[in-house]
Amino acid sequence: MTEPIDIQLKKGVLELCVLELLAQEDGYAYDIASRLAEAIGMGEGTVYPLMRRLHTEGLVETYLVESTSGPSRKYYRITRAGRAELIRERNAWHAFTRAVNGIVGGRK
Amino acid sequence: MTRADFLAALAAGLRGAPKSMIDEIIADYSAHFDEGAAANRNEADIAAALGDPHALADELRMQMRIQTFEAAPSARSAVQVIGGAIALGVVNTVLLCVAAPLLVIVGLALMLAVLAFAGTGIWLFAAGSSLELPGGAATTVLSGFGLIAAAVSLSAFLLLAGKALVSGIGRYARLRFRLLPRASQPGKSP
């Protein structure tokens, strides 16, 4: 059961992308899911198991916002531990892409 | 697939999980359908973009099992993590057929060693003074004590190694199954 390389690559950066989005501003899962689905092309449903895991690991926390139209919305906020993890993953990402680009070279 | 179909399939896949967790997950995905509807998307499109509900349920349940194991490691939760990993196809079949029996044999041998050490140790320790072995009673009793200590440390090592192994399988499963392709994209299903 070998996966296409693009799926394997996306898997590795999904958590980084979610933390990065939340570091910019708090968000709700639908918004995060549709932004990521559009940007890197993945199943929107994948975001929910990830959000649960980030929550149990204490990297994000949730709060409810009452809505004027319809039910209240669950927002996610990045925690201090989440920011620390984001910095770790961002550094790893930059170091990795630099190294790979050094080998792969630019697009001709 | 309609909203009702998707949620029913998800709930069916989550059967056996704690009710509070199922309710929470169903509420999350219901909210997703509500948001999608508010953005003028139709149910079938939203469901397709979410991905396969059975695969999502498998991943969520695996996550729960890993969490349970890490909070309270026990033989039962360990079996659930390993079983889940096998069901998800995370553990390679060849690896499973070769490595698993080997691991079981090594584990059993070590457990037998623990029992032998403990048995002999207790016997020497309790009856040592009346056995009249070379070296005298004190030596015999002390050797018995040593064997008991060896049995205790070996079993502690076995427990730690087993826990590390199961945690490792759990972490690996988590890495393998984070991204599900959109159901609407042909040729990308796992």
Image: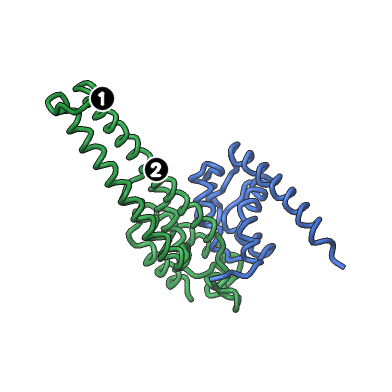
Chain colours: A blue, B green
What residue sits right under mark 1 in the picture? B142
A75 vs B14: above or below: above
Q: Position of residue B104 (x, y in %)?
A: 34, 55
Q: How many marks?
A: 2
Q: Residues within 10 Å of mark 2 (few under 14, many from 20)?
A: few
What residue sits right under mark 2 in the picture? B71
The outermost residue toward the right is A108
Using the image, tell me which numbered label, if any, was put on residue B114.
none
Find residue A79 and report its image quarter.
top right
Find residue B46 and report its image quarter.
bottom right
For the residues marked 1 and 2, what is the alpha-carbon distance in whole angstroms? Answer: 39 Å
Q: Position of residue B43 (x, y in %)?
A: 53, 72
The residue marked by circle 2 belongs to what chain? B
Q: Residue at x 62, y 70 (%)?
A: A4
Query: Can residue A49 be seen by looking at this rendering?
Result: yes
Q: Residue at x 66, y 44 (%)?
A: A23
Q: Residue at x 28, y 41 (%)?
A: B114
Q: Secondary structure at mark 1?
A: helix
Q: Position of residue A61 (x, y in %)?
A: 53, 43
In depth, the one of A24 and B145 nearer the eye is B145
Q: Position of residue B110 (x, y in %)?
A: 33, 46
In depth, the one of A96 and B33 nearer the eye is A96
> As drawn, is B21 to the left or to the right of B45?
left
The residue marked by circle 1 belongs to what chain? B
Q: Residues within 10 Å of mark 1 (few under 14, many from 20)?
A: some
Q: Which amino acid, mark 1? A: Leu
